[in-house]
Image (tube, rainbow, N blue to C red):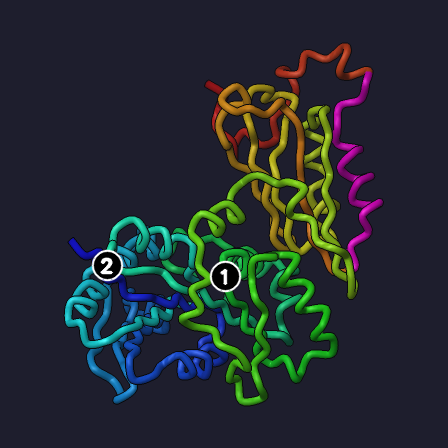
Amino acid sequence: MAAQRKTPLTLLVGLSTTLRDPVLASMIDAGTVAIVVGQDELTTRGVLSWQVSDASGPIDAGEFTVDDDCGSCQLIESLLPLLETLIAREHWQHVVLAAPPAMEARSLATALVATLPEVAVDTVTCVVDAVLLVAQLSGDELLAERGLALGLPDRRNVAEVTARQIEYADVCVLANAHRAATPERLHNLLLHLNPRTTVVDADPAGVPTQAVARTERFDFAAAEAWAGDLAAQDRLQPSGDGVTTVLWRSTRPLHPARLNDALENIVDGVVRSRGVMWLANRPTQRVRWESAGYSASLGTLGEWADTEHLAECTVVATGVGLDPARLQSVLDACLLTELELASLDWQTLDDPFAGVLPDQR
C-alpha cells in the first residue's frame, strides 16, 4: 500500500500583523492556500476571526468563539477541522497557517504533529521587528497591556512570547532590517536565542530576500529539544557584536530567600535565561527557571530521583551588553555558604515561593 501523501504546512508567527503581511504574500503561489487567524475582535466580541485565501483571492471566512478559558487551546480545537476540510479537497499542494499574533508556534505544531497525519509541518517562520526586537525582549509589558492577550487568564508578557516564538522558528525574518543601526548584532542575538534558525532579512517593502516557506527545515524532535527545560553547554554561542550567552552552574543549593531578593539583579541585562534550580528548602524537587525581559518564573519539573542527574543548579543566560562576571557574582551570592551547608536544617528555611511552587510530595 502506498504511503499517504502529506501536505506540507508552513506556520507563520510574529507579534506584528503589519510586518507579517508582505511575508505572507510572498508565500502564496498557485498551489498554496492560506488560513489567516486574527484576534482584533477578541477583547470586544470574544472571537477569533479567520479567512481562507489562495492566489485567486479570498475563498471563505468565519470566526471562532473564545470564552474565558484558554484561547490558544480553543483555537487549536477549532482549527483542526478547518484544516482537515481544506486538505481533503486536494486542490492545493501547500498550506500556510498564519497564527494570531500572540500564539506560540510550539503548541500549534505539537497538535498538528499529533492529530493530523495528512499534514507535514514543513517550516515554522517567525517575523520580528529589527527596530523593536531588543526592546521587546528586554521589557516587562504584558500582552494584555497591548490588547494581545489570548483570553482573560493570559498573563504572559511580550518578552516571553517574543523569545518563545524565536526559539521554535526554523526561519526568522528580520523585518525593518534597513532601519536597524546594528543589523549584525540582531542576527547574532537571534542565533544565540536559537542556533537552529536561519535569519533572513526583509527588503524595505517587507518582502523576504530568501525562501521562508516550503524549506523542509522543520524537525519536531530538534525543535522540542531546544524548547525543552534543560540548560546545557550546547546552548552556548560565540560572543560577538555585544551579544553574550553564559552558562552558570553550581553543585550547591540556592538559599530561597536570597534568590527571591536577587531576582531583579539576576534579570538585569538578561533578555532570556532558562535552566534548572536546586532550592535548599526543596531538596528533592527539580525547579524550572525561566526569565524573559524583566520577568522571571519558577515551576516544577519533577523529582531529582526520577532523572539521571545529580541535584545541581544550571542556568543559561543571553544578554546584550551582559556582564558575565556580574551575573556570576549575583547568582553565587544566592548559594548556601559552606557554614550553612554544614549547620542548617535546609527544609526549615522560609519559602518565598510557596505561592508559586506546589508542596513537595
Q: Which residue is mark 2?
A: 118
Q: Residue at x 79, y 59 (%)?
A: 321
Name which residue type carries label 2: Glu
Kindly identify which residue carries mark 1: 169
**Residue 128 x, y percent position in the rendering:** 55, 71
Q: Are marks 2 and 1 in contact (CB under 8 Å)?
A: no
Residue under the point 58% across and 59% down? 159
Which residues fall within the magenta stretch? 321-338
The disc placed on residue 110 is: none
Pick the front one: 262 or 336: 336
Asked if residue 294 shows in the view, the reply is yes
Query: x, y (%) of residue 267?
Result: 70, 49
Q: Earlier in the sequence, mark 2 or mark 1?
A: 2
Relative image position of residue 167 (x, y in whole percent)? 54, 56
Kind of residue at disc 1: Ala
SS for callout 1: loop
Q: Is residue 151 above or below residue 251?
A: below
Relative to the observer, which residue lies in front, 239 or 348? Answer: 239
Question: Which residue lies at the image location 38% right of the left edge and 53% below the top edge?
Answer: 107
Q: Is residue 312 left or right of residue 206?
A: right
Q: Is residue 352 magenta?
A: no
Residue 9 placement, left or right of 166 = left
Q: What secondary structure is marked by label 2? A: loop
* Residue 148 visible within the image: no
